[in-house]
Image (cartoon, rainbow, N blue to C red):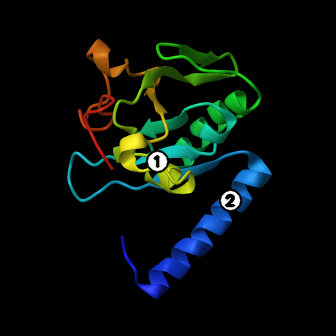
């Protein structure tokens, strides 16, 4: 952990802003672009659902706008009182372009870093998280064999870290 005063001041501002967003909207979406390594896909996750008694949600391998849209829609359902369960298939009649499967994320301490900071949890006692595994009409789910062209686009839960 850094003790640089500028970094501490910046983190304090970020924490205050995040708390303000969560108070206003019940959750926030944190987006992380792809890393320098090929196995570091872009991803986004919620911060705030743990405070509502639900695991945070993670979506891997999509752009910022799509990630925010998908995660926000699912987070809204959760914030309205619906508890998701691992293995559940999410499909909405008015949103036919994507299907989601809820999967337990076995290594949330390596992924939901801002959520753990927000809830003051060390990685080894991380907030829980679900990975929303996606499939578009022209693709199958990763375990069905005909997933996205790039195998690292949507890694399986627990096989990647932030």
In the rendered image, residue 56, in percent from the top left (x then y), is placed at 54, 37
- Does dot 1 land on a helix, a strand or a loop? loop
Mark found first going from the N terminus, 1 or 2? 2
Say whether residue 101 is left or right of residue 154. right
Q: Quadrant of residue 53?
A: top right
> Which image quarter: residue 69?
top right
For label 2, the SS is helix
Question: Which percent across, then down, holds residue 75?
Answer: 65, 35
Relative side of 93 to 63, left or right = right
Residue shown at the point (70%, 21%) measured from the top left? 82
Which residue is at a point 73% across and 45% down the rendered structure image?
Answer: 26
Residue 127's place in the image compared with 142, above or below, is below
Quadrant of the rendered image containing residue 103: top left
Between label 1 and label 2, give the one nearer the viewer. 2
Mark 2 nearby-residue class (10 Å; few <14, some 14–19, many ≥20): some
Farthest residue, direction bottom: 5
Residue at the spot x=37%, y=19% of the render?
A: 141
Mark 1, residue position: 63
The percent position of residue 139, horizontal first and vertical second, equals 38, 21
Classed neighbour count for the residue bearing mark 1: other residues with Cα under 10 Å, few (<14), some (14–19), many (≥20): some
Q: Which residue is mark 2?
A: 19
């Amino acid at each position: 952990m850094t003790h640089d005063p500028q970094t501490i001041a910046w983190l304090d501002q970020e924490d205050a802003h995040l708390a303000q967003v969560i108070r206003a909207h019940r959750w926030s979406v944190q987006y992380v672009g792809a890393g320098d390594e090929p196995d570091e896909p872009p991803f986004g996750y919620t911060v705030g659902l743990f405070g509502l008694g639900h695991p945070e949600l993670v979506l891997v391998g999509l752009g910022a706008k799509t990630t925010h849209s998908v995660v926000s829609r699912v987070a809204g359902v959760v914030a309205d009182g619906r508890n998701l369960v691992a293995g559940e298939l999410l499909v909405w009649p008015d949103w036919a372009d994507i299907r989601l499967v809820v999967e337990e994320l076995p290594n949330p301490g390596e992924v939901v870093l801002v959520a753990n900071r927000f809830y003051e949890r060390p990685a080894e006692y991380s907030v829980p998280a679900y990975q929303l595994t996606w499939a578009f009409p022209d693709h199958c789910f990763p375990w069905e064999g005909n997933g996205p062209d790039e195998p690292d686009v949507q890694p399986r839960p627990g096989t990647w870290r932030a």
